[in-house]
Image (cartoon, rainbow, N blue to C red):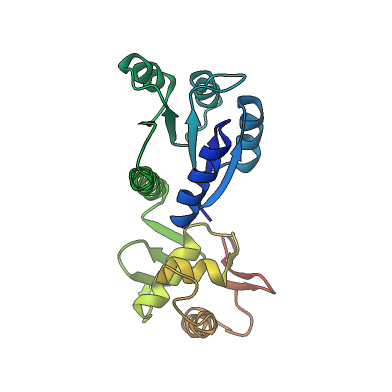
Amino acid sequence: MTKVMLIDDDASMQVLIEQIVRRGGYDFCCASNGADGLAMLRAARPDFLILDVMLPDINGFEICEIIRGEGRKVPIMFLTAKGDIVDKSIGFKAGADDYLVKPFQPEELLLRLNAHLRRRERDREGAARDRRPEVFSVGDLEIHFGKYDVRLGGEAVALSSREIELLEVLASDPGAVFTRDQILEALWGSKEAADPNSITVMVRKIREKIETDPSKPRYLVTIWRVGYKLADRL
């Protein structure tokens, strides 16, 4: 689950932001000072950080500079009672992505949070597309990404669009094991959107079309009690 972290020494603000974040469907963790916050951030690896400027030990600007100095790209929103443009300038120079001044409307915080997380997901997807080759091949099997074209020995394989999408998911990280829940989320957007048994049925149908002996698959492999993977070598 997407995790949002807060570093703020105000207990009432911790309670308020946790309510907002969880209402938005996100996980939440928080720390009350900079030192604990940096340790928590390194361990929990949150997807978004809300950072108060005025803290009892290290100020928020310094924390932001430390985080960016470590190469971490987590989106950071400063939260402060100060609305001075000088403070905003310092914050953005330190590496912040946004700046919200207290008091604020809960809806505004949630809207900004959602927008940053959507942008981060688009950036990740774009980076993954840039890294991904146009064609994945292993043995005689070829999967042409984005073209709904799977070939075996140079001949097109008659697969359904959903079966091809399943192969593309596995081919996005060949050799890695994908659970049924991960495959359901990739194909339908939610693990509750389809019956997990549908994955078993699709895998069987795909094997009948790409494997020499479907009972002893070489390409589409089952990892017992875990999920499936696409072989990265034969």
Q: Nearer the viewer, residue 119 or 4?
A: 4
Q: Nearer the viewer, residue 74 or 179?
A: 74
Q: Position of residue 167 (x, y in %)?
A: 45, 69
Residue 94 lies, with reference to residue 218, above or below; the image says above
Residue 168 lies, with reference to residue 202, above or below; the image says above
The part of the image, by quadrant, that contains residue 228 is: bottom right
Q: Nearer the viewer, residue 33 or 182?
A: 33
Q: Position of residue 218 (x, y in %)?
A: 59, 73
Residue 214 shown left or right of residue 77 in the figure: right
Q: Residue at x 58, y 37 (%)?
A: 11
The part of the image, by quadrant, that contains residue 91 is: top left
Residue 101 shown left or right of residue 36 in the figure: left
Q: Is residue 156 visible?
A: no
Residue 142 shown left or right of residue 230 in the figure: left
Q: Is residue 66 visible?
A: yes
The part of the image, by quadrant, that contains residue 187 is: bottom left
Q: Position of residue 201 (x, y in %)?
A: 51, 85
Q: Residue at x 46, y 61 (%)?
A: 137
Q: Position of residue 182 (x, y in %)?
A: 53, 66
Q: Residue at x 31, y 17 (%)?
A: 85
Residue 6 lies, with reference to residue 156, above or below; the image says above
Q: Nearer the viewer, residue 201 or 157?
A: 201
Image quarter (top left, top right, bottom left or bottom right) of the C terminus: bottom right
Q: Residue at x 52, y 57 (%)?
A: 173
